[in-house]
Image (cartoon, helix red, strand yellow):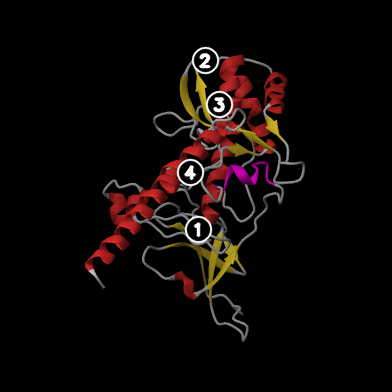
Amino acid sequence: MKFSNLIRQHWAALRALLVLTVIVGIGYPLFIWLVAQIPGLNDKANGSIIEVNGKPVGSSLIGQLFTDSNGNPLPQYFQSRPSAAGTGYDPLNSGASNLGPESILDTPADPSLLAQGKKPADAGFKASLLTTVCSNSQSVGQLEGVDGSRPFCTGDGVGAVLSVIGPRDSRGNVMQPTKVVSVNEPCETTTRPFLDIYEGVRVECAKFGEDYTVGQIVPIIGAASSDPAVPADAVTASGSGLDPNISPAYADLQIARVAKTRGVSVDQIRQLVADHTDGRTLGFLGEPRVNVLELNVALDEKYPNKS
């Protein structure tokens, strides 16, 4: 190939690169941005930012915490759905816990590290999905003054799960237990498991370092109602961990607390919740929902906290 032809081909390629850069790299993004600024679209395109007195307080598309510096719920505000995104509602770390229905066994903390003053999470403790749900339900129940018990949960807010050890039949079921252990109740934290006797065998607490998966893992349903007072979205995170909404049922559960803290009637708060409840999209997609940030902003505007 002649040198002049090589120059022409490279010059043509360079011109094509420049033209496509202008069209695809500058023109197209600029056009989309201009379209997004059309009234009716610009709010969502710019992040759906909510402002109070000219200052941004959050996005209506991303949930956030309403807690004090110690992580305790602020009683004058409606609380959001739990989040598993990073340390909570982190849009750069969006995601779920990836724990499924079979996640019922906790990873215990190392007692020696706990004795050194380390927090359970820093000592190796990892809660199962079941224990997370039980713990969250207990906490919400205490905050709202309702029964936070759930099926398959102990009174201490952990998964009610036994490891039943003994000879098995051809299907793998234990025929006659020789040892029964409450696997999510370490001996370092309890002296008496949630259940005293199982099929005639005394239930023991779990000892660190022992493998109880050799036994048949048996969740115990317990005596809690099959229709818990605490709704499911109050104890589980969404798939993204960023859900800004809660169910009307969870909002209704919080009305009495918020009304008492703000010194107004329950009916006044209930009406405000109703005003900020959205129905199903297009009438059939999704579920009715309440945007927590928008509701709390409206609360501060209409019923300022007096405490």
Mark 4: which amino acid?
A: Tyr
Q: In the rendered image, which residue does mark 2 sit on?
A: 307
Write the residue at 69% across / 36% down: 248
- Which badge, 4 or 2, comes first in the chain's sequence? 4
Write the residue at 42% across / 60% down: 107
Q: In the rendered image, which residue does mark 4 sit on?
A: 28
Depth-wise, is mark 2 or mark 1 nearer the camera?
Answer: 1
- Which badge, 1 or 4, comes first in the chain's sequence? 4
Q: Quick check: marks 4 and 2 in contact, CB under 8 Å?
A: no
Q: In the rendered image, which residue does mark 3 sit on?
A: 77
Mark 2: which amino acid?
A: Ser
Q: Which mark is residue 285?
A: none
- Residue at the extreme left of the image, as rendered: 3
Identify which residue, 292 or 2, lies in the foreground: 2
Secondary structure type for disc 1: loop
Q: Which residue range is magenta in the image?
A: 228-237
Depth-wise, is mark 1 or mark 3 nearer the camera?
Answer: 1
Q: In the rendered image, which residue does mark 1 sit on?
A: 98
Write the residue at 54% across / 40% down: 139
Query: Which image quarter is the N terminus in?
Result: bottom left
Label 1 to label 4: alpha-carbon separation:
37 Å
Depth-wise, is mark 3 or mark 4 nearer the camera?
Answer: 4
Mark 3: which amino acid?
A: Tyr
Q: In this picture, is 90 found above or below 176?
A: above
Crowd around label 2: few <14 · some 14–19 · many ≥20 (10 Å) = few
Crowd around label 3: few <14 · some 14–19 · many ≥20 (10 Å) = many
Crowd around label 4: few <14 · some 14–19 · many ≥20 (10 Å) = few
- Residue at the extreme right of the image, as rendered: 283
